[in-house]
Amino acid sequence: MIAKRTTAFGLKMKHQASLLILLAPAMIWYIAFNFIPLIGNLASFTNLKSVVLPWKIVGFDNFIRMYKSPDFWTAFWNTLIISFFYIVFYFPMPIILALLMNELKNRSFKRAVQTIVYIPYFFSWVVVGSIFITLLAPNRGIVNIIIGFFGGPSDTYFMASTQWFRPVLVMSYIWRQVGYGTVIYLAALSTVDLELYDAAKVDGAGYWLQLIHITLPSIRNTIVTMLLLNLSAVMRIFDQILVMQIPAVYSVSDVLRTYAFREGLDNRAIGYATAVSLLTSLLSCLLVLSMNKISKAIFDESVL
Amino acid sequence: MPLLPRSTKMRETLSRRVFVILNIVFLIVLCIVYIVPIWNVVITSVADDTDVQGNVYLLYPKSFTLKAYLRILDGGYFKAFMLTLVTSVIGTVLSIVFTVAAGYSLSQKNLIGRRVFMLLITITLIFDVGIIPRYIVVSMYKMTNTYWAIFIPMLMSTFNLIIVRNYLSTVPESLMESARIDGCSEFGILLRIIIPVAIPIIAAVTLFYFVLYWNRYTEIVMFINDQTKSTLQVLLRTLMFEGDSADSRVQIFDNFKMAVMVMGMLPVLVLYPFIQRYFISGLMLGSIKG
């Protein structure tokens, strides 16, 4: 009896050991590239310039410098403004597109649209940026040719215009991302109980009433989840802007991440850049957690 | 009495018809907005030098030549292309091994400390480490400007790990129990039972990882400033946005730029038609709340 139990215990230990061995490589990676960098955030309180140089602790100097730097505040407000634009202009797009596509009776046409719209999601921001620079080139890009055709000025240099660069960011963001969201919303829409619509039709409800009382409530969870994902993503927008911005448009497009990147890598102010980076992560974390709380309170639905 | 409902019904069908037509027209225009820019790039990339010196990017084929691609073949861009391909493949293999092993382990309900491990992983989703601290540790590990820096620091994607774990959690416990009673080891179970049932998710995650590696830009710029070790995306960005070519011998015509761009999207363009359904199914699996 005892012997049997020890073998069972031994088996259990062996089972646990193998599970831990399987988990180990990933956990070591997480420690090395996620948790040690978390400690690296302490560099915010140093004057670290490059990783080999001697450094000393400077307390809150970096945060004070940040507070006094006009460039930091430009980046701060740009982050908020651009994030706001993304939420307002991008977020509803996949919902609208999915609703429109859901009305299609022809399945192969529906699939074709979905396939085409989903393609750019797999292109890098460098490729998407390159496509837009080609599309928007002064005089020779398609957009300027079309404007010229209708008698407008065809030499607008959209990518270098402080007036146009933000709309270009939003448009290219929509162009690349909308297919991804649409696929998710279409999946959610396909789970809506069709009998609900029949019942609503019997009651004489038109399209808009059905939309408000059946369709949207049925995909509410997906909408809330996507909103939260979007919020956490927009605060971190970085790759797109790093790729697409040129110095002429820094004033309207520099966000906290690109600012930290330049301070750290180009100006070799690692300590200061870490402080900016830490603040960004904290803000984004705060935003996500509070949104989660709000969604819990309103919809009784926690996403995290 | 029956007149009124019929007339409303007729009005509704009319407005419905208008809507259906407008909807189809809108979606066709939308598809054009997606196809034309890509078409534009591809057509210009196969045009002859003389056809791309005019004032427009080409919208219809004027000539067909692979000249621009041949120029890429004997220069720094081709080396970058191969480097990107090789590191993407190696990186994807490593990532998938790490992810499936860890995903299986974390899907086992009796794993000691499972909650702690999951909490740690979830933290990385909510609190993003940020780019500069990551740069500091990669420098500390003396990894900057080495080929390792192209894939090691970005090996795991928490999103992918969670979808694999969630999928494997749905594999019935009884399957594994019976194998364990037969004396099968944990590794044996993973290889013989788990992997075969998890093929769809493994396929989807493999694709996601490969695309992540292929498209990577920011981390490469951060960790590597030796141009001979740069990946294709980095060189493409310099070529398109700064007008500097990694290949000083080549005179930059538009067809050359566009050809490098086509190389930058090649895997997606080539594979997409065949594996699109995996991308979509992967996304569905990912959207299951975890």
Image (cartoon, rainbow, N blue to C red):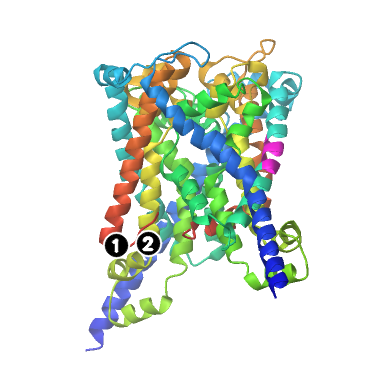
Identity of the residue drawn at 66% across and 21% down: B229
Q: Is residue B251 visible?
A: yes
Identity of the residue drawn at 62% across and 51% down: B102
Identity of the residue drawn at 45% across and 52% down: A181
Residue A27, position as x, y percentages in the image? 58, 43
Q: Dot 2 corresponds to which residue?
A: A221
Residue A236, position as x, y percentages in the image? 40, 36
Give the magenta range: B88-94
Question: How would you rate the neighbour count of disc 1 (Cα within 10 Å): few for under 14, some for 14-19, many for 20 or more?
Answer: few
Quadrant of the image containing the C terminus of chain A: bottom left
Chain letter for mark 1, please: A
B139 to A147, vertically: above or below: above
Mark 2 secondary-structure assignment: helix
Residue type at tag 2: Asn
**In the image: residue A173, left or right of residue A74:** right
Examine the structure image and report whether residue B124 is included in the region drawn in magenta.
no
Asked if the residue under mark 1 is in contact with the one under mark 2, i.e. CB atoms within 8 Å, the reply is: yes
B68 to B250, vertically: above or below: below
Q: Is residue A179 visible?
A: no
Find the distance from the CA under tag 2 to the CA under tag 1: 8 Å
* Nearest to viewer (mark 2 / mark 1): 1
Quadrant of the image containing the N terminus of chain A: bottom right
* Rendering quarter of residue A158: top left
Q: Dot 1 corresponds to which residue?
A: A299
Q: Earlier in the sequence, mark 2 or mark 1?
A: 2
Along the viewing direction, whichever of B120 and B210 lies nearer the viewer: B120
The lab-note entry on whether marks 2 and 1 share a chain reads: yes
Along the viewing direction, whichever of B164 and B19 lies nearer the viewer: B164
**In the image: residue A285, left or right of residue B68:** left
Magenta segment, prevailing SS (helix, strand or loop): helix
